[in-house]
Amino acid sequence: MNIYVGNLPFSLTEGELEDLFSEFGAVSSAKVISDRDTGRSKGFGFVEMSEKDEAEKAIEELDGAEVQGRTLKVNEAKPRENRPRRPRY
């Protein structure tokens, strides 16, 4: 199951994100999304967990949890919409 994690602390690393979710089961991947121009975290990411029940438990426990002073928003990720690319100037 693919999980969206929002309102991440900007200093949180992918390793720390994986550690946070690995408490609930096996994590296939953890990705913090960063700005392509600055490389700075955009404050959200995605975690992939293979076991649906473990992923649901992680969502239940971590949604609203505080990490480094920020309240996480955690839910099942929705499929990405196809949207037109913005031109880069």
Image: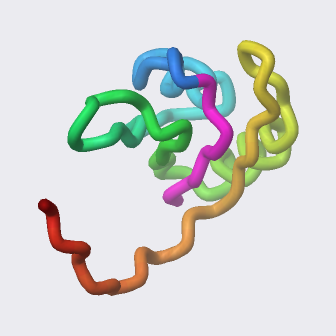
The C terminus appears in which quarter of the rendering?
A: bottom left
x then y, percent, for residue 43? 54, 37
**One can see residue 30 in this view:** no
**One can see residue 33 in this view:** yes
- Residue at the farthest left position: 89
The reply to whether the magenta stretch includes residue 3 is yes
**Position of 5 compared to 35: left or right?**
right
Q: Residue at x 35, y 38 (%)?
A: 34
Q: Residue at x 75, y 37 (%)?
A: 72
**Position of 10 compared to 87: left or right?**
right
Front-lying residue, 34 or 38: 38
Q: Quadrant of residue 24?
A: top right
Front-lying residue, 70 or 57: 70
x then y, percent, for residue 54? 66, 45
Image position of 77 with respect to 73: above or below: below
Image position of 17 with respect to 89: above or below: above
Q: Residue at x 42, y 18 (%)?
A: 15
x then y, percent, for residue 81? 41, 83
Q: How many marks?
A: 0
Residue range corresponding to the magenta coloring: 1-9
**Position of 4 compared to 50: left or right?**
right
Q: Residue at x 77, y 26 (%)?
A: 70
Q: Quadrant of residue 61?
A: top right
